[in-house]
Image (cartoon, grey):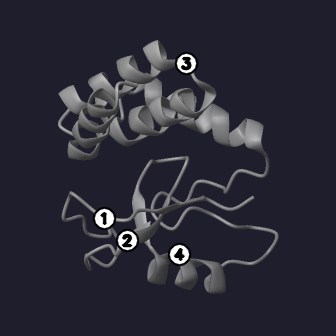
């Protein structure tokens, strides 16, 4: 199973890859184990270095999840640790399921922790009346 690939039309935060410290483009990978945003180049270099039997996260070296259940377990662990990126991802999952109250709760918590993208999502949902 591969990390979650996120494609955004715009980036509000001037993020840098925690490995190479280059600015992250509009396409990046979010690791489910540590919720780090990794650039395409570092993800590619990690995939080239790792063997098929033993793939690990390029940042924390945690084994890559092999199933959706493992990804959900990692995300729930990051949410319990108040990781703002994981909170926003969970909020967006609730949004896609139509669970608006849980969506707003998670996005609000991520925004309170200082994650600007969560503020943007909340403002967008309020503007649209979602």
Q: Position of residue 8 (x, y in %)?
A: 41, 62
Is the residue marked by circle 1 packed among few (<14), some (14-19), or many (20+) residues within 10 Å? few
Q: In the image, which disc is placed on residue 26?
A: 2
Name the N-terminal-most of marks 3 and 1. 1
Q: How many marks?
A: 4
| Mark toward the viewer: 2 or 4 | 2
Residue lying at the far front in this picture: please name it. Answer: 128
In this orientation, which residue lies closer to the viewer: 50 or 80? 80
Vertical side of 22 occupied by 95: above or below: above
* Numbered circle sitting on residue 56: none
Which residue occupies 25% across, 69% down? 16
Mark before the other along the chain sequence, 2 or 4: 2
Asked if marks 2 and 4 touch (Cβ < 8 Å), the reply is no
Pointer 3 or 2: first along the chain: 2
Q: Is residue 122 left or right of residue 58?
A: left
Instruction: Assess whether mark 2 and mark 1 are in contact (beta carbons under 8 angstroms).
Output: yes
**How far is disc 3 from disc 1 in space, using C-alphas?**
25 Å
Q: CA distance from mark 1 to mark 4?
A: 20 Å
| Disc 4 element | helix
The circle on residue 10 is 1
Mark in front: 1 vs 2:
1
């Amino acid at each position: 199973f591969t990390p979650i690939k996120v494609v955004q039309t715009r980036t509000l935060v001037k993020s840098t890859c925690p490995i190479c410290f280059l600015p992250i483009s509009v396409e990046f990978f979010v690791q489910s184990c540590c919720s780090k945003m990794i650039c395409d180049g570092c993800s590619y270099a990690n995939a080239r270095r790792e063997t098929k039997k033993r793939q690990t996260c390029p940042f924390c070296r945690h084994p890559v999840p092999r199933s959706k259940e493992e990804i959900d377990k990692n995300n729930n662990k990051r949410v319990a640790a108040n990781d703002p990126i994981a909170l926003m991802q969970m909020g967006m999952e609730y949004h896609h399921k139509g669970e608006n109250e849980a969506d707003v709760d998670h996005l609000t918590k991520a925004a309170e922790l200082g994650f600007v993208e969560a503020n943007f999502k909340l403002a967008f949902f309020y503007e649209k009346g979602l």
